[in-house]
Image (cartoon, rainbow, N blue to C red):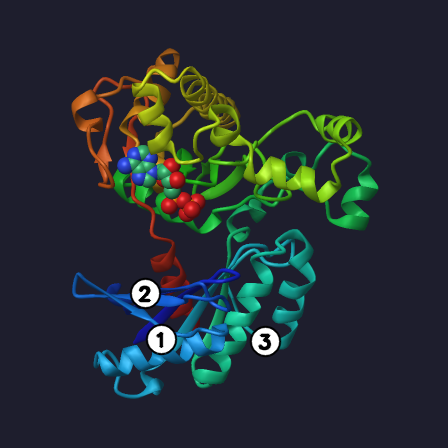
Amino acid sequence: MKVLSVNCGSSSLKFQLYEMPEEKALISGVFERIGMKESFYTIKINGEKIKTETDLPNHKVAFEFLIKELKENKIVKSLDEIKGIGHRVVQGGSYFDKTVVVDEDVIAKIDELSSLAPLHNPAAITGIRAAQEVVPNATQTVVFDTAFHQTMEEENYLYAVPYEWYTDYKVRRYGAHGTSHKYVALRANQILGRNNTKLITCHIGNGASISAVKNGECINTSMGLTPNAGLIMGSRCGDIDATIVPYIMEKTKMSPKEVDTALNKKSGLLGISGVSSDSRDVEDGINKGNKRCALAQKMYVRRIIDYIAKYYVELEGCDAIIFTAGVGENSIGTRREVMDGLKVLGVIADPEANNVRGKETLITTKDSKIPCYIIPTDEELMIARDTYLLAK
Ligand code: ADP
């Protein structure tokens, strides 16, 4: 059975087609600058990348090009071969604790939650509508980034603010990157050979979050109401004293939107280093003696260690720590600094094993009390798995 994973951003559409249940990736691609000038798309097939520049006025046109490529590359003969299409949705609120088949009620709920994910949820609906029109016979599903975190207890998802903010405005911790945390936790359990485990999963990319996972279920996570909580990120501040916001608004006369932009786009590694949100540039800066880059990296690593320590206590131990996503899979330095900061918990890094990028690897020594692993994430595959089960 062929299953398509789709990830729509406001101006992009990423996809990957799988043969299931073999989990064989057949073709993937990304459409960029949808609805803008100079739009284009890139297709990856048999290890080869082909770029096409073409007008992409909306997601439906992008979807039509996607189908055209599947046919021209002889991946499918008829659209009926695509039995399932799974869409990534960032915010599922408290409505969804698992992947579901799309119907009008599901779309209405995704739409209702748009105020919590204004860039992402409307884009996902556009993608669903486009897929429904172009491939009407496929089972369409939605896979939520928040679903994995719905197992958290009230005491972990509530904020200590007036309770009405929760009942009236749904202010609570929803988490993010759930599909990734779930994928690496499943894989870690396979590696450890059991399911009754205590894991700390670190998804550290441009956006970043850490989860505490007990027996395969999330019990706590660092992201909050929105994807700007917890860790210090590329350009997001993560946890701060909430009163900074009204204080700065009063001092600078910034509007709520301007402060929000500053906290999401001008903070984090970028804000402190003044150089870049990309950890590679910050590393370069450190190598050139830039003090603010060194300070940014120190703060970044400190926050990761703090969360791991917090979840170690909450889980009452830890069977494995997992590093994944852009920085987690690729930044040798960041991983080493985090592991060195966890010496007190008995973590012993293996510098040789850690000298690797993007490959599943045990990066601690045999004597380490907690093994640490790199496990490359695969959100698209996770979407395909859920969709396959529902379409079957
Ligand atoms: P997103 O949150 O956008 O999905 P990714 O998980 O793709 O982010 O992570 C992107 C980030 O990963 C980059 O901004 C960069 O900081 C980091 N990164 C990628 N490659 C490397 C590398 N070789 N060394 C250090 N950091 C890297």
| Residue 384 visible in image | yes
Mark 2–mark 1 distance (CA, rounded to whole Å): 8 Å
Marked residue nearer the N-terminal end (2 or 1)? 2
Q: Give the labeled residue for mark 3.
A: 103
Instruction: State the image quarter where residue 295 is shown.
Output: top left
Where, quadrant-wise, is the N terminus in this rendering? bottom left
Q: Are marks 2 and 1 in contact (CB under 8 Å)?
A: yes
Instruction: Report the mark closest to the observer, 3 or 1.
Output: 1
Between label 3 and label 2, give the one nearer the viewer. 2
Helix, strand or loop for disc 2: strand
Residue drawn 57% across and 32% down?
238
Q: Amino acid at mark 3?
A: Asp
Crowding at label 2, few (<14), some or many (≥20) Cα neighbours within 10 Å? many
Residue denoted by label 2:
29
Q: Quadrant of residue 360?
A: top left
Residue at 36% across, 78% down? 65
Residue that mark 1 sits on: 66
Residue 312 to residue 51: above or below: above
